[in-house]
Image (cartoon, rainbow, N blue to C red):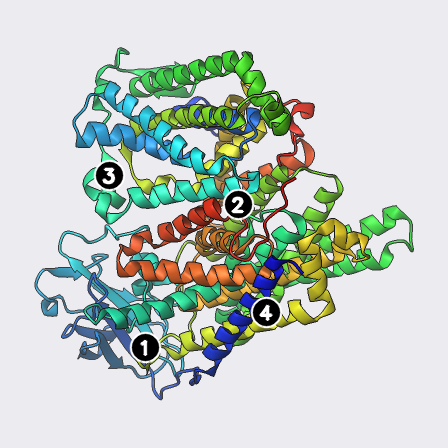
């Protein structure tokens, strides 16, 4: 077992593009849940429409990349409106089930036979991000320090993804410290009190849903660019559960909470995975095969979520007072 | 009595009448026992239509046993000398219809098991050339299951459009609708059984149990383990559950009689010993292999499911409630639990789809326009019996009335002297057991795989919301509606979308009648 290797693998994942993608989507979720108190269990639906918004417009309609971006954002806005207008008046527990259901229906629609001309059905779409990589200003070669290295392609993508995360964090910070932010936090604490002050709670909730959904869609766009291929089945409800794990691990209701959560969780996931693989290879776990490591690391996420809520419900940097709201 | 309650009572009566009518349908034989062993290859094309005239040759080692061409039902049957695992079936590609190839590119099946007195089932699904290995839908590649107890790629073809084997397209619309209604009925009954617990748990604790789907999977997999050989993991699980019971019993006996520290340490020690023992049994007890008939295995699965439910309530949810953890945090904990349980089951069971060995190859019975296998008919009858039993239990027994009372209004029930925590414990036990039972039925009707419950979970949500959260009868009605809607939607729309229709119905109902069909409107103001 090579601990140095395990450590570098963990760090590489934690600062790689995937962590940035999840951080971005979790920032959206943070706006929904951490600040507005909306139980959105369908964030993956926004990622789906974002990724496909880019993929379809570039691949099927031959639009340039920047137009694909705009389409992705527009798709997220449309989905948020479709989702929000009927469901935002529901009680929190109904809302959570509804959001899962909508995200799942969206996935089923995108993979359906009749949509194949547009979405590629179960086969998905491939090769639409060449425009992005053609713009890469970084000369070929590998960059990094020590054993942690990235190719020029990865560095360009990471700059873009983490740049988006930084912008998103800045936007969130500004929003939350604005009068608007105070109103949505008020909605989280006591909806009726805010309503009695003459605010239109529904409109504020909708704005929050749209904005958080746009962050989710941007995460989807980065997924599409990173993989150069998308298919509907990578947008399963589990993704949302992972986002929740990250948000709660970092601390909901804090600007940097989701970012820290994403980085830490990806680090833990990789380290656990590599550690299990190493232990299985040296024969320390006789009843397991190395293919089980992948499954067990998901089990570890479950355990982390469980223990976190029991022992530290506010997450790593959260504020306990702020996070003990009882959503009605 | 309010009007809502009155309506509900009437609906329950109607439901019971429907159930009685279904029960009156004559039930038929259950098992299929035919004389000698044979290997039966099931050959279907991409529309799941049988393919005639394809030759399959069976070898044992290098020795040819025999060959047969498939009949109009797509079955090629080759008699073999006895049970065993060393048979190899080879498809003669020359006899395949023009332009068709096997979906996985493999023309050979090996490693499947022929059991005593039973046929070894294998399947070849054919697709047009150029489409192989792209397995429509998210199903795993059929070749993967070759090392399972039984090779069954036909089952892996498309879980979401798995209509009855006897069903062939091209028949009249009415017959098609009737056949699909039967499939929908089975599916709906499975959902109903599984979802009762979900609904009652919500009613008694206000919590949405995201781990309920994994209780379903748990039941199906337990039944699989104990019906196909419990050596190793099965024994180990039994020891683990036994140790848990012992620890809980010790804790209960010691509480209040000895100092607190002792009462805490002894159960922990028992549990620790149990874990060690179960690990030892798991690693070294491989040779102590035993298996029971499927029906007994189902019973074991139900008991284990009930114990798991009770354990979760007693050692996870009760302490959390005692600490006044907010509901949203409870949701997250249940998501964590479900991730944990599901992936542990994945490690235990593997990623393949499998079918129970028993009750697989059956002649379909024709009842008027529909055909149904005795297996599925039995599932229907048993499900109805279980639902009626649960309904009677809820309606007439003390604990059942208490469950409905707590579900209706926890505080009011508590203030009228009901031991709410105890009732909740029973609800979890019942919910866990029923979920496990639903899982085994679902596995019998379709296939067993590690995500089956998770895929069923959203439909269970749909069922309980449709019927009214927190009411057991609502879950029953909602389950049936969802099952029928899902299956009947394939009359007009693609089978890939059947779950989407079920979920769409749920969203629609939420918008116009958030309390569900049988739910009671909450007082506003």
Q: CA distance from mark 4 to mark 2?
A: 24 Å
Label 1 Cα crowd, 10 Å radius (few <14 / some 14-19 / many 20+): many
Front position in the image: A161 or B352: A161
Q: State the image coordinates of residue B266 (x, y, percent, origin top left).
A: 81, 53
Label 3 Cα crowd, 10 Å radius (few <14 / some 14-19 / many 20+): many
Label 2 Cα crowd, 10 Å radius (few <14 / some 14-19 / many 20+): many
Labels 3, 2: one chain: no
**Residue B486 found in image quarter:** bottom left
- The first of marks 4 and 2 along the sequence is 4
Q: State the image coordinates of residue B99 (x, y, percent, origin top left).
A: 9, 60
- The label on residue B371 is 1
Label 3 lies in what chain?
A: A
Residue identified by numbered label 3: A119
Residue identified by numbered label 2: B339
Q: Secondary structure at mark 4?
A: helix
Whether tag 1 and tag 4 are in contact, CB under 8 A, the answer is no
Q: Is residue B125 visible?
A: yes
Residue visible at 67% across and 54% down in the picture: B408
| Above or below, comparing residue B376 to residue B491 in the picture | below
Whether tag 3 and tag 1 are in contact, CB under 8 A, the answer is no
Q: Nearer the viewer, mark 1 or mark 4?
A: 1
**Residue A210 found in image quarter:** top left
Q: Secondary structure at mark 2?
A: helix
Horizontal side of residue B250 vs B460, given as left or right: right
Label 1 lies in what chain?
A: B
Residue identified by numbered label 4: B300
Q: State the image coordinates of residue B51 (x, y, percent, origin top left).
A: 17, 70
Q: Residue furthest left?
A: B98
């Amino acid at each position: 077992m090579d601990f140095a290797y395990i450590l570098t693998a963990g760090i590489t994942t934690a600062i790689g593009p995937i962590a940035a993608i999840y951080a971005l989507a979790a920032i959206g979720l943070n706006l929904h849940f951490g600040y507005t108190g909306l139980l959105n269990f369908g964030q993956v639906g926004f990622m789906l429409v974002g990724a496909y918004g880019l993929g379809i417009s570039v691949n099927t309609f031959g639009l340039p990349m920047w137009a694909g971006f705009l389409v992705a954002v527009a798709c997220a806005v449309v989905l948020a409106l479709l989702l929000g207008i009927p469901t935002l008046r529901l009680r929190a527990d109904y809302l959570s089930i509804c959001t899962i259901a909508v995200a799942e229906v969206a996935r089923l629609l995108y993979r359906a036979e009749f949509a194949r001309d547009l979405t590629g059905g179960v086969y998905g779409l491939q090769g639409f991000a060449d425009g992005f990589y053609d713009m890469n200003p970084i000369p070929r070669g590998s960059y990094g320090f020590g054993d942690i290295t990235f190719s020029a392609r990865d560095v360009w993508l990471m700059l873009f993804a983490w740049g988006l995360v930084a912008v998103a964090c800045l936007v969130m910070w500004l929003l939350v410290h604005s009068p608007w932010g105070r109103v949505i936090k008020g909605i989280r604490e006591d909806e009726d009190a805010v309503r009695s002050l003459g605010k239109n709670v529904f409109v504020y909730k909708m704005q929050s849903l749209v904005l958080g959904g746009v962050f989710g869609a941007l995460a989807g766009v980065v997924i599409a660019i990173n993989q150069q291929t998308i298919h509907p089945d990578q947008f399963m409800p589990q993704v949302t559960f992972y986002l929740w794990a990250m948000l709660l691990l970092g601390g909901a209701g804090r600007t940097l909470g989701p970012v820290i959560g994403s980085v830490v969780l990806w680090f833990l996931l990789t380290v656990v995975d590599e550690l299990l693989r190493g232990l299985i290879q040296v024969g320390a776990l006789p009843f397991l095969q190395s293919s089980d490591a992948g499954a067990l690391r998901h089990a570890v996420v479950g355990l982390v979520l469980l223990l976190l809520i029991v022992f530290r419900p506010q997450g790593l940097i959260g504020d306990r007072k702020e996070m003990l709201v009882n959503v009605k | 009595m309010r009007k809502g309650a009155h309506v509900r009572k009437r609906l329950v009566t109607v439901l019971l009448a429907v159930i009685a009518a279904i029960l009156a349908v004559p039930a038929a034989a259950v098992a299929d026992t035919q004389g000698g062993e044979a290997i039966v290859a099931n050959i279907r094309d991409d529309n799941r239509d049988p393919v005639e005239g394809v030759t399959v040759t069976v070898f044992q080692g290098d020795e040819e046993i025999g060959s047969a061409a498939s009949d109009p039902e797509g079955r090629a049957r080759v008699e073999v000398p006895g049970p065993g695992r060393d048979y190899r079936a080879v498809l003669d590609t020359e006899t395949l219809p023009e332009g068709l190839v096997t979906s996985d590119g493999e023309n050979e099946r090996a490693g499947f098991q022929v059991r005593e007195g039973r046929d070894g089932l294998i399947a070849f699904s054919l697709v047009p050339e150029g489409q192989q290995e792209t397995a429509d839908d998210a199903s795993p590649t059929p070749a993967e299951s070759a090392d399972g107890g039984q090779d069954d790629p036909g089952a892996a073809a498309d879980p979401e459009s798995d209509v009855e084997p006897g069903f062939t397209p091209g028949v009249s619309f009415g017959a098609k609708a009737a056949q699909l209604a039967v499939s929908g009925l089975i599916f709906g009954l499975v959902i109903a059984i599984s979802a009762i617990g979900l609904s009652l748990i919500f009613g008694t604790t206000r919590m949405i149990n995201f781990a309920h789907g994994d209780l379903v999977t748990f039941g199906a997999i337990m039944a699989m383990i104990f019906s196909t050989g419990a050596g190793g993991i099965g024994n180990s699980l039994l020891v683990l559950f036994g140790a848990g019971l012992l620890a809980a019993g010790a804790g209960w006996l010691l509480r209040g009689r000895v100092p607190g520290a002792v009462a805490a340490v002894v159960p922990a020690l028992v549990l620790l010993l149990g874990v060690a023992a179960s690990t030892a049994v798991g690693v070294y007890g491989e040779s102590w292999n035993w298996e029971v008939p499927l029906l007994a295995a189902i019973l074991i699965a139900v008991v284990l499911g009930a114990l798991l439910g009770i354990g979760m309530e007693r050692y996870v949810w009760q302490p959390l409630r005692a600490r006044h953890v907010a509901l949203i945090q409870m949701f997250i904990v249940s998501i964590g639990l479900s991730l944990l349980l599901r992936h542990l089951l994945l490690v235990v069971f593997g990623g393949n789809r499998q079918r129970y060995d028993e009750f697989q190859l059956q002649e379909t019975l024709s009842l008027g326009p529909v055909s149904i296998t005795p297996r599925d008919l039995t599932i229907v009858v048993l499900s109805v019996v279980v639902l009626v039993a649960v309904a009677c239990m809820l309606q007439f027994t003390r604990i059942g009335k208490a469950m409905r009372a707590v579900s209706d209004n926890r505080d009011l029930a508590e203030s009228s002297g009901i031991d709410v925590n105890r009732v909740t414990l029973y609800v979890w036990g019942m919910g866990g057991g029923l979920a496990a039972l639903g899982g085994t039925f679902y596995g019998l009707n379709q296939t067993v795989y590690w995500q089956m419950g998770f895929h069923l979970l959203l439909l269970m949500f749909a069922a309980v919301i449709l019927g009214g959260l927190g009411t057991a009868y609502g879950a029953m009605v909602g389950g049936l509606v969802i099952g029928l809607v899902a299956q009947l939607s394939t009359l007009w729309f693609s089978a890939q979308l059947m779950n989407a229709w079920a979920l769409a119905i749920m969203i629609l109902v939420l918008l116009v009648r958030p309390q569900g069909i049988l739910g009671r409107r909450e007082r506003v103001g």
